[in-house]
Amino acid sequence: MISRCNNASTNKIVVVSENKRTFRIKNNSLFLINAVTVDPCYISEGLRCDYLFEIINIEPDEVINKVLYVELKGSDVEHAVDQLEATINFCRSIHQGVP
């Protein structure tokens, strides 16, 4: 689990916003969701997305079930894809084997 630049919670709705764009996760199963601010906290140089979310099953051990990478972009989708790919590659060793 990434423990820098994060906000972990089991709230039913997890929300992040940037530049009038909002992303929500409905968390009906009450998983632990680790919302990591990637830009500019976790990664401060080069291409990077805005946020990543680690969906964690608490029982029996804290195991990351899924990772979601999010770029809140109003335009220039090709650049957003580059930002997402760069962040995924940066986090590859941490999230190895996670769907």
Image: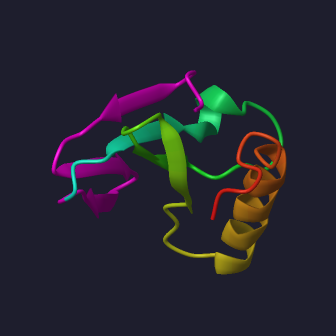
Residue ranking furthest to the front: 60
Could you tell me which residue is drawn at 78 percent across and 66 percent down? 82
- Magenta-drawn stretch contains 55: no
Q: Position of residue 87 (x, y in %)?
A: 74, 51
Where on the picture, by quarter, is residue 75? Answer: bottom right
27 relative to 80, above or below: above
- Magenta-drawn stretch contains 5: yes
Q: Position of residue 58 (x, y in %)?
A: 37, 38
Apparent side of residue 64 relative to residue 79 in the rendered image (left or right): left
In the image, 84 versus 32, the foreground residue is: 32
Visible residue check, residue 52: no
Q: Position of residue 65 (x, y in %)?
A: 51, 55
76 relative to 15, above or below: below
Could you tell me which residue is drawn at 36 percent across and 39 percent down? 59
Apparent side of residue 82 relative to residue 51 in the rendered image (left or right): right
Q: Position of residue 67 (x, y in %)?
A: 56, 56
Visible residue check, residue 39: yes
Where on the picture, by quarter, is residue 38? Answer: top right
Apparent side of residue 82 relative to residue 4 in the rendered image (left or right): right
Q: Which residues are magenta?
A: 1-28
